[in-house]
Image: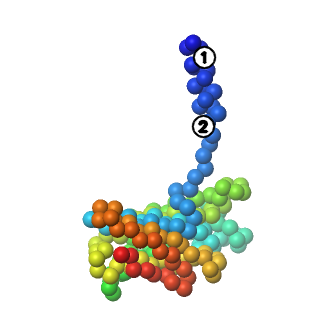
Amino acid sequence: MTYFKNHFWFVFFFLFSVPVNAHLMVAERGTLNFDETGVYTVISLSASNFLAADANRDGHLSFTEFKKAKETIFKQVLAGIYMQQDKQVRYLEGLMLSPQASHHGNGREIDQIIVMGKFINVDHTKHLSFHNVFYGDKAHSSVEITAKYKRLGLKKAFVLTSKKQGERVF
């Protein structure tokens, strides 16, 4: 019986443990998670927002091109994703960029860049709005944002476009 159990589990795990390719986030979506210390932010942006980094001008952003242009992309993201409270602008802190390869193709081209960071010193009760200027190479592209303040039971979903780049959060 032990022989059967050992082989059963081996076959079971072999059959059901296939490699998984997953993005950290669905394309062109984002979340704003509020707590007492600020707003944790995760947004997936199309790599087509950063085609100036496409050194060989083939219309695709490779990992090598991303690494070479990382500082420029970093500065663009810092300037293009922000929160505004009345007239005061707050920028992301602790910014991290995570390039994600396409599931289709050779795995060397980036199709999404995951942006992660935190906005601090913001107050959700005082006319707080979220802004994003990145909409890829398509004029009708959009980014869906979900804002949540779980402790208070607040939730709001909204869509930003190239024509409507900001939205009041709560």
Q: Is residue 154 toward the left or the right of residue 43 in the image?
A: left
The residue that appears at 56% across and 68% down in the rendered structure is 28
In the rendered image, which quarter is residue 87 located in? bottom left
Residue at 52% in and 60% down:
25
Question: x, y percentage for residue 85?
Answer: 33, 81
155 horizontally vs 60: left or right: left
Q: Amino acid at mark 2?
A: Ser
Q: Note whether 21 is above or below 44 in the view shown.
A: above
In the figure, residue 66 lies in which quadrant? bottom right
Dot 1 crowding, Cα within 10 Å, few <14, some 14–19, many 20+:
few
Q: Residue at x 54, y 85 (%)?
A: 163
- Which tag, 2 or 1, sits closer to the chain's start? 1
Residue 113 visible? The answer is no
Residue 106 placed where, x, y %?
71, 55
How far apart, in angstroms, are the residues tagged by discs 2 and 1? 20 Å
In front: 99, or 32?
32
What residue would you read off at disc 1?
A: 4
The amino acid pointed to by label 1 is Phe
Task: Tell me if I can see residue 38 in this picture.
Answer: yes
Along the line of sight, the residue nearer the viewer: 71 or 161:
161
Q: Nearer the viewer, residue 170 or 18?
A: 170
Question: Mark 2 Cα within 10 Å, few/some/many (few <14, many 20+)?
Answer: few
Residue 17: mark: 2
Where residue 128 sits in the image (x, y, percent)?
34, 79
